[in-house]
Image (cartoon, rainbow, N blue to C red):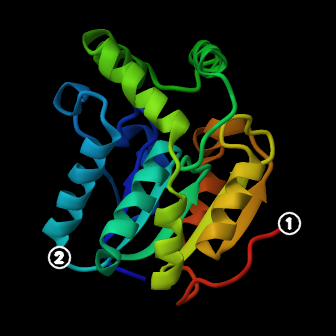
Amino acid sequence: MSERRLFLPGLAARGSLYAPGLPQGWIALDPPLLGETRGSFDAHRQWLLEELEQYGRPVSLAGHSLGAALAIAAAADRPDLVEELILFSPAGLPLSKPMRDSLWLLIQQVVQGLYPAKEVVAVVGETIKHPRATHRLAHEAHDLDLSAEMTRIADAGISALVVACASDTLTTPAVCRRIAATLGCVCEQIEGAGHMWVLSNLAQFRAFLRPLLPKAGALAGP
């Protein structure tokens, strides 16, 4: 496994939200501020490519939700700089869940205390400052189709793993299986608390951040 192990957070989240679940050796990146990218997925994609180019050697790249989609995009753009992918509930195919339902679920999770107060303050503050950018990035994430990028990754032979949650109604198990099938890799399914299970079950999240097989190619489950 690469000595360089980078994790990409989900939409509007900071790396520190996921840091408690990361094993030693993993670094959680903070995406650029919405004021800098204006909510453009392509701008975030370019940012990640520049980050990878600074390392100059292949890295292990993991991500959750939109972060996983960014990992897919970067691996397709620069397969020489990505050794393996670990994708938790990845975006990357058009989603069917209405955005208003996702927003309501987010509010419920905040009320339930799933997110630390300092993370809520940071995200809300950024959203208030840049509402149009937030709306744009959410829409782009919802409608993403990285099928061509996934095919390029499979052709490059990059090792990959997709992790789905049975109760996830956003990036559903069906979506995750389609992504895994296109990547030519395994999709493992767990039981958990929906799309944000990675925050409520840190031990299970941490267990998946392990070395993968030397080469992708195992077929996804049915």
Figure quadrant of residue 50: bottom left
Q: Residues within 10 Å of mark 2 (few under 14, many from 20)?
A: few
The disc at residue 169 is: none
Residue 60 is left or right of residue 145, and the answer is left
Q: Which residue is mark 1?
A: 222
Q: Is residue 21 above or below residue 139?
A: below
Q: Name the element at disc 1.
A: loop
* Proximity of marks 1 and 2: CB atoms separated by less than 8 Å: no
Q: Name the element at disc 2.
A: loop
Residue 217 is left or right of residue 30, and the answer is right
Q: Is residue 160 above or below residue 62?
A: below
N-terminal-most mark, 1 or 2: 2
Please tell me which residue lies in front, 117 or 125. Answer: 125
Q: Residue at x 17, y 76 (%)?
A: 56
Q: Which residue is mark 2?
A: 56
Q: Is residue 3 above or below residue 93?
A: below
Q: Amino acid at mark 1?
A: Pro
Residue 93 is left or right of residue 53, and the answer is right
Work out which residue is located at the far front of the displayed protein and give it: 148
Q: Amino acid at mark 2?
A: Gly
Q: Position of residue 176 (x, y in %)?
A: 68, 55
Q: Is residue 118 visible?
A: no
Q: Position of residue 153 (x, y in %)?
A: 47, 74
Q: Quadrant of the C terminus?
A: bottom right
Work out which residue is located at the far left of the displayed protein and give it: 54
Residue 79 is left or right of residue 156, and the answer is left
State which mark lies toward you, 1 or 2: 1
Q: Is residue 102 above or below residue 145?
A: above
Q: Position of residue 5 (x, y in %)?
A: 36, 68
Q: Quadrant of the N terminus?
A: bottom left
> Separation of disc 1 and disc 2 at Cα?
37 Å
Q: Position of residue 63 (x, y in %)?
A: 47, 54
